[in-house]
Image: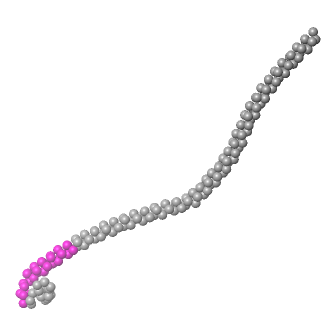
Amino acid sequence: MKKDVCLRLTTRKNKPLSEEQARGIRPDIEELLTRERLDGFEKRLEEREALLKQKENNIKITIEAQIGEKRKRLKDEYDALKLRLETSARRPRSAELEKQYKSRISTLEKAMVEKDREVGKLSSAVFQAKKDKNDLKKSLSSAKKTIKLLDDIIFAKDQTIIAYNR
């Protein structure tokens, strides 16, 4: 073991000892140096572990954030595709309903045009009937006057006949 320690002390990177200096180190000092080195190594190891743990946590947080963003983007894409699918599924039905609607509107417009013609004819007929009614009233009034005149003539004739017969 002493050879290993001596070799280590003479070949270390920072401040290597000469062989004479290494041989002069007593075993308890050697143990103290070794322990001191081990403590320093353990401390650096703990610091590195803490640093690695911190990096691991940072990476984990970053990855979780990226996954959250990706999940949100995928959900938005899914919702958009689902909406587009529903819209396209409704589109043929919508087109069919629109076609039926236009057909019915066209039929109703044709029926309205026909009814407008009939209303026009009926309006003309009503106007003509009113005109005929007025003409008939005038004719009736004229006929009444003529009848009254004829009654008066007949009455006068009857009076004349009665006067001649007496």
Asked if residue 5 can be seen in this view, the reply is no
Quadrant location of the N terminus? bottom left
> Is 111 in the magenta?
no
Against 166, is 113 above or below?
A: below
| Image location of residue 44, percent across then percent down | 18, 75
Against 7, is 162 above or below?
A: above
Q: Nearer the viewer, residue 141 or 91?
A: 141
Q: Which residues are magenta?
A: 20-48
Against 80, is 148 above or below?
A: above
Residue, x 36% and y 65% (percent of image)?
68
Q: Is residue 3 left or right of residue 88?
A: left
Quadrant location of the C terminus? top right
Asked if residue 85 can be seen in this view, the reply is yes
Residue, x 26% and y 71% (percent of image)?
55
Say which quarter of the image contains residue 148.
top right
Q: Nearer the viewer, residue 80 or 130?
A: 130
Query: Taken as a whole, is the magenta stretch helix, strand or loop?
Result: helix
| Image location of residue 93, percent across then percent down | 58, 58
